[in-house]
Image (cartoon, coloured by chain):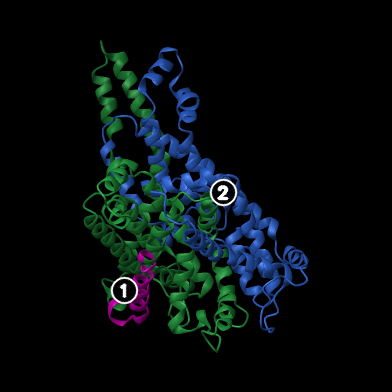
Amino acid sequence: MPVETASRVARTTTGRGGLLARKRHRELLLIWLLLTPALLIFLAYRILPLLWNGVLSFQFWSPTKPAEWAGLFHYEEMFVYDDVFWTSLYNTFLYMLTAPISIGIAVVLALMVNSRIRGRGVYRTIIFLSYPLMVVAVGIIWRWLYDERVGLINYLLRQAGLIDEPIAFLESYGTALPSVIAAAIWQITGFFMIILLTGLQNIPPSLYEAASIDGASRWSQFWRITLPLLRPSIFICFVIAIIASFTSFDLIYVMTGGGPGHATELLITYIYKAAFTLSQFDYAGALTIVMFVLFVGIALLGNLLAGGDAGKVDIAE
Amino acid sequence: MHNYPRWPIHAALILVSLVMLVPFYWVFKTSITGENIFVYPPSLIPVDPQPFFYVDAWYAIPFPYFFMNSVIVAVMVIAANLVINAAAGFALTKEFAGKRWIVLLFLACMMIPFHATIVPAYLVTSHLGLLNTHLGLALPAFSHIICIFLFKASFDAIPPSLIQAAKIDGVPEWQIMFRILLPLARPAVAANVILSFIWSWNDFLWPLIIIRDVEMQTLPLGLSTFLAYFEDTTGSLYAFCVMVLAPGLLVFLLAQRQFIEGLTSGARKG
């Protein structure tokens, strides 16, 4: 522990420089005291759980049974026999489609609300409004919109003559996942728009002026100036969207509960079910480890593609 | 540069605004009319609006309990975040042996989403004897790493000469925190309050896991529980939904600018 070494240093140097050393010693003590609460929280609710998951995944264990070594049993079960695991993995990847779609829409929206038009502040507020809302409530709102009998969406589609029979969006295998993804896009796009807007506003106007003088069209200005300079902001949005595909529990739970069958099951909902409805804590631990490895892998890959330590440099030091 | 027509932009934005607002309208309409699910087509404008469903929901649901539970947890989380994150952020502005490792540890923890810890987190909370309690609900959210770094960044931006001057004037170290650093780090304080409020107020998975009694449920959990009860009595469910959404919406509209700034600063550092 650095505290101890520091105190030893302080003790040995006591004498002439004693006052200064004691002061440094007290400062170090204060620093570690200030760090302790945060460290305890993260030890108890991040580090320890991660390790515990690892241990659980190699054990037969439930709250009523003593632990027993299981080796790779759970992993074999998962990869070889468990179709639901593969379905939920596949769905989690499909759910990542939220990223390109919502970011694409958000770029267009950000450009529009950044142009000098009247009422842009109002537009920004309205489009952002859905993001800070409780996801559970958003899920309930969208369930109601998708309702087969009196849902607004079926009504509009029928009025427009696009469909003859109402579609049970959330109860059909083919439409359930896309419907949930649409709701997720509805909620998150406004947030991406705001992030991209901040990025747009950080682009120096002089660049555009220079480009216009050189006779560059608006179109090539967008591709040559705006988009390249927006890259860091777009990367942030991608990270947020990828994280969401691993953590979108609330929306699925409320809208479909993972059904019909397992058509909208994500890894996170499957982990929840394994642990808290089936009481298979050990198996849930193994599932979590796979999800975590996947998550870190994608994060590292994304970081690599973005050209190294994107976004992390400024906080590290 | 400004010679392009504006109306296509307005048209597109109005269309998008409609897409964003109509869901709210539709749910609000249902909450005051109570859709009969066997009548087609649904009416677009509210017919015969009445507050009955709000009264019905109020009596069917222990709403004050849910609300108070959410408030208690949010207050605990916000207070803890301010104290713990400001303290840790302040410590990280100093130089000390092992600082590199602490920063690395925090960054590593950031890579562990809370969702990847739910099973052991439940077991930890159970060992602490905190299942089904407010403290158990709040504890895992007591500190957010992003907020620690937000504090560190704004403390770093404060000129050291200011702190030196205070020291020379004989202000004790611990008072420097409250009298100089925190007032100057107001954006970080605002971001902290807003981020920890939203995350605690909207949190659903964690209460779902550790809460057993109806009286201990928070708003989102209560809403999802009563989704099943209200399945076909549409008016009351959506009245409840509006009641749950209203406080958050109100807070957002009142502190919109701080909200957006807080959320984007959270995202930039995340």
Q: Residue furthest top?
A: A16
Label 2 vs label 1, nearer the camera:
2
Camera-side residue: A271 or A63? A271
In this view, B184 is above or below A305: above
Camera-side residue: A109 or B24? A109
Mark 2 surroundings within 10 Å by alpha-carbon count, few (fewer than 14), some (14 through 19), many (20 or more):
many
Which colour represents chain B? blue
Q: Residue furthest bottom?
A: A164
- Residue under label 1: A74
Camera-side residue: B2 or B163? B2
Q: Amino acid at mark 1?
A: His
Write the residue at 65% across / 62% down.
B242
Left or right: B169, with B28 as reference point: left
**Magenta region:** A79-100
Q: Amino acid at mark 2?
A: Ala
Mark 2 touches mark 1? (CB < 8 Å) = no
In this view, A109 is above or below A257: above
The letter of the green chain is A
- Residue under label 2: B74
Write the residue at 21% across / 51% down.
A308
